[in-house]
Amino acid sequence: MSVTTTGAPAIKVLPEPSDLPGPLPEPGIEELRLETVLGALSDPLRLTIVRKLLLESEDFDHSCGWFGLDRPKSSLTHHFKALREAGITRQRQYGLERRSHVRVEDLNARFPGLLELVAAWTPRD
């Protein structure tokens, strides 16, 4: 894993493919609120999801199965929806599957340094 000059792990930003389906409803960049974003990130599972997307993404976006989380599907659906509605992730529908990626550019524009803090966070074992 590479590290930034600040000591935080380097965030992976993959190019957006040209043939993506439209995103599900989400707040616009001007509607992103720090208290809403921090509220969504206050849950350790959601923080883990965002950190994994930032540091380990293999593709532009990922289905919930990629995360390897041992949780009921209904619970994961709730957490991914909370991240999308807070404006942290963008979700797209691919048939019956939803895939997510972090809105890196939007979050960096509104809250500089926030994603570096998420990347530097160490989950408890």
Image (cartoon, rainbow, N blue to C red):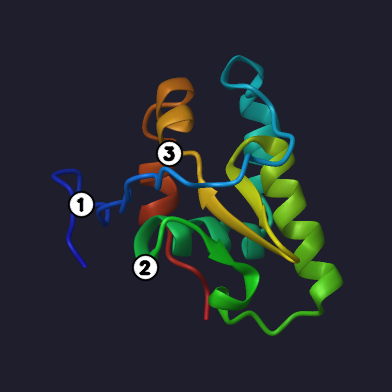
Instruction: Give the mark nearest the N terminus, 3 or 1.
Output: 1
> Secondary structure beneath disc 3?
helix
x%, y% of residue 35? 68, 29
The answer to whether 113 appears left or right of 125 in the picture is left
Q: Mark 2 points at which residue?
A: 58
> Secondary structure beneath disc 1?
loop
Quarter-wise, where is residue 100 in the image? bottom right
Q: Mark 3 points at which residue?
A: 104
Calculate the distance from the C-alpha at mark 2 to the C-alpha at mark 1.
22 Å
Quarter-wise, where is residue 2 in the image? bottom left
User: In the rendered image, which quarter contains the N terminus?
Assistant: bottom left
Q: Residue type at mark 2: give it.
A: Glu
At a point 19% along the width and 44% down the height, the residue shown is 6
The answer to whether 88 appears left or right of 97 in the picture is left
The answer to whether 34 appears left or right of 81 in the picture is left
- Mark 3 is surrounded, within 10 Å at the Cα level, by few (under 14), some (14 to 19) or many (20 or more) other residues, namely some
